[in-house]
Amino acid sequence: MAEKKLSGLKIAAITTDGVEQVELLEPKKALEEAGAKVVVIAPKAGKIQGFKHHDKADTIPVGMELGQANPAEFDAVLLPGGVINADALRVEKKAQDFVRAMDQQGKPIAVICHGSWLLISAGLMKGHRITSWPTLQDDIRNAGGHWEDQQVLRDRNWVSSRKPDDIPAFNREIINLLAEVGQKQHKVA
């Protein structure tokens, strides 16, 4: 790709052990190919354990500990799924605070599969249209969100998707949203 339309943008990928590996690495790759810098952020330094559904996959290096991550230094956040990952992150106060700060600043939030559990636990779901893994629809509705069964859905500063099969559409929509953010930054500069 000759044009790097996301050049200069820095994306936080908040995750932990049990992440659905493809939901982290494929969007990360697409964003980096478009020129963004993606930092894998986890509660602990070192490596996290990726999964392919219920089976262990690769370990993934952590670029920054969650406690060191400052939302003001990032242009967007990526929340990959995986049941184990999402269930562990939803109770992490620092993760909740991070996504709340990003949303309050109107920064893009890209979430796939079970990743929306963090947004629910952070109290951000009310009034949002979102898609996810289908079993989360009751959680989303109970939190005041509007769940829809779509491959990818954009609602204001949020982009959401359901599952690994949807990643190509998810990546396209994330890049489109972030390109808009990048254009606004260049106009201000």
Image (cartoon, rainbow, N blue to C red):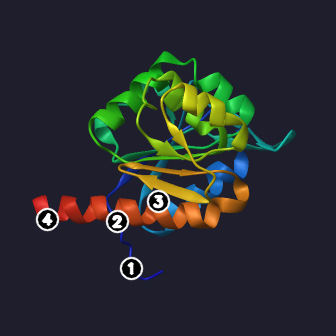
Residue 73 picture location, percent across and down: 31, 40
Q: Which residue is mark 2?
A: 179
Q: Residue at x 45, y 55 (%)?
A: 154
Label 4 or label 3, whichever comes before in sequence order? 3
**Secondary structure category for the residue under label 3:** helix
Label 1 or label 2, whichever comes before in sequence order? 1
Looking at the picture, which amino acid does disc 2 mark? Ala
Q: Which residue is mark 1?
A: 3
Q: Which residue is mark 4?
A: 187
Q: Quadrant of the C terminus?
A: bottom left
Give the alpha-carbon distance from disc 1 to disc 4, as whole Å: 18 Å
Labels 4 & 3 near each other (Cβ < 8 A): no
Looking at the image, which residue sits at the far bottom?
2
Q: Which residue is mark 3?
A: 174
Give the alpha-carbon distance from disc 1 to disc 3, as whole Å: 16 Å
Q: Nearer the viewer, mark 1 or mark 2?
A: 2
